[in-house]
Amino acid sequence: MNDVQLDEFLLISKHRLISHYQVKLLSCLQCISPEMLWDQESEGENCIGSIALHIIAHVDRNTMRLTNPDTRFDQGIETHFPNEPMSKLELIARVTESFEALGAAIDQSHSKNHSMYDLYHLVEHTAYHSGQVIDRVQRRIGTRFQFVQQGLNEKALRQRVENELEVRKAKNTAT
């Protein structure tokens, strides 16, 4: 894979994480009651807030790896679903901060410093757990999100990526 293809992969990943998963996660968190964040529907099941914190932890770890590729962690976070009740606004702020930091880290790091495996895993991992949150919120509030119909679809994602690639190309030719 050449540098141009790698840059495109990074942009696709960034926009999928930020323009899709972050937006969906925030939409879910904004429309539920604060009590629903920390309420377990059944014994042994992670609550919506715990899943959101798990996503944040995974995003933060990957942001650290992007800014410092030598970063190593002692153990995985497979079972790290913290039950740290906080306000809905605080959780929304933490999601926003984590995803913004990730986007900046992807933009500011050099392509050669990325592990495509790690970033691809982050995209998959975030998609999986975001889906859990969406499913639980839809079930709890009794309505379905219409994300695709509201413009969170592959066509819009592709357009975002292509627009950013054009801007970058224009900057590179201007310098």
Image: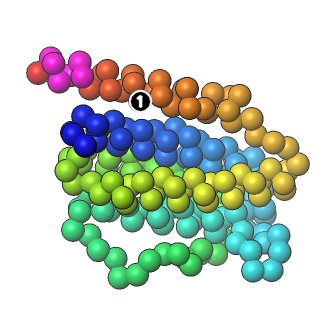
User: Which quadrant is the N terminus positioned in?
Assistant: top left
Q: Residue at x 30, y 62 (%)?
A: 65
Residue 169 drawn above or below residue 138: above
Residue 153 or residue 134, whichever sits in front: 153
Is residue 108 visible from the viewing direction of this image?
Answer: yes
Residue 111 lies left or right of residue 9; in this view the side is left
Residue 51: percent from the left, percent from the top?
A: 63, 65
Q: Residue at x 67, y 44 (%)?
A: 27
Which element type, helix, strand or loop, lies under badge 1?
Answer: helix
Q: Quadrant of residue 133?
A: bottom right
Extreme-front residue of the structure? 1
Is the residue marked by circle 1 packed among few (<14), some (14-19), or many (20+) residues within 10 Å?
many
Judged by its main secondary structure, the magenta piece is helix
Q: Which residue is mark 1?
A: 161
Residue 62: percent from the left, percent from the top?
A: 38, 61
- Residue range in magenta is 169-174
Residue 103: percent from the left, percent from the top?
A: 38, 45
Say if the magenta span includes residue 96.
no
Residue 3 drawn above or below residue 30: above
Q: Quadrant of residue 8?
A: top left
Say if the magenta span includes residue 172.
yes
Residue 143 drawn above or below residue 121: above
Q: Residue at x 39, y 22 (%)?
A: 163
Amino acid type at circle 1 is: Val
Residue 28 lies left or right of residue 77; in this view the side is right
Q: Residue at x 51, y 55 (%)?
A: 124
Residue 42 lies left or right of residue 127; in this view the side is right
Residue 11 lies left or right of residue 89; in this view the side is left
Q: Quadrant of residue 104?
A: top left
